[in-house]
Image: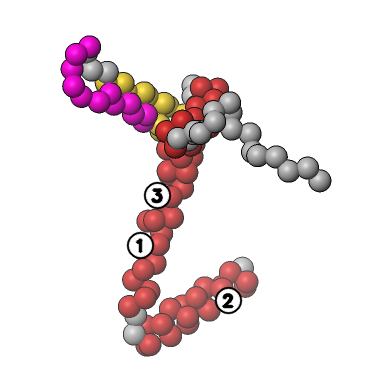
Amino acid sequence: MRYAPAWDCGYVDPTPLSQYSASSFAQPIRRALGGIAFTATEHLDMPKPGEIRTAKFGIEIKDRAMIYLYGPICACVLAASNGLNRFNYLKIQEYLAVVFAALILLLLVVAI
């Protein structure tokens, strides 16, 4: 078996700034699916020549599937869980009444 150093992209001693980041791996996906699955907005603030401030780059990505598909489902689940949360604070007599009511309801469903 032959051992060799890992490929360094042509740089002898790369710094962490020249390494691939998560955004560099995500950029091709953003470009290909940006108009279909995502709403991507890029913000670039470049200083004028001679200004002593850093450039700022930001990306705002909104996932359409999360907004239009999972958003309403999550809202329904949250509403149901908030409605059922009151069962956590029942007394024993109230728990027994709920079980008895469920039993009567199931017997009526089976009888019909």
Q: Decide: marks 2, 1 in contact (CB < 8 A)?
A: no
Which quarter of the figure has residue 9?
top right
Q: Please, what secondary structure does the residue beneath circle 3 have? A: helix
Q: Residue furthest left?
A: 51
Label 1 belongs to which residue? Answer: 82
Q: Nearer the viewer, residue 32 or 85?
A: 32
Question: How far apart are labels 3 and 1 at the CA level?
Answer: 10 Å
Q: Is residue 104 magenta?
A: no
Whether residue 3 is situated above or below residue 88 in the rendered picture:
above
Q: Magenta span covers which residues?
A: 49-60
Q: Nearer the viewer, residue 81 or 11?
A: 11
Amino acid at dot 2: Leu
Q: CA distance from mark 2 to mark 1?
A: 28 Å
| Crowd rating for badge 3 (residues with CA inside 10 Å; few <14, some 14–19, many 20+) | few
Residue 29 screen position, x and y as percent: 54, 28
Location of residue 33 with respect to 111 vertically, above or below: above
Q: Determine contact: label 3, label 1, CB under 8 Å.
A: no
Give the distance between the C-alpha atoms of the residues marked 3 and 2, in whole angstroms: 32 Å
Q: Which residue sits furthest top?
A: 49
Front-lying residue, 29 or 93: 29
Q: Residues within 10 Å of mark 2 (few under 14, many from 20)?
A: few
Q: Left or right? Give the position of 32 relative to 60.
A: right
Does the magenta portion include 55?
A: yes
Q: Decide which of tag 3 and tag 2 comes sooner along the chain.
A: 3
In front: label 2 or label 1: 1
Say which residue label 2 marks.
107
Residue at image x 22%, y 11%?
Answer: 49
Q: Indicate the amino acid at tag 3.
A: Ala
Q: Residue at x 38, y 87 (%)?
A: 92
Label 2, secondary structure: give it.
helix
**Is 90 left, or right, of 69 in this rendering?**
left
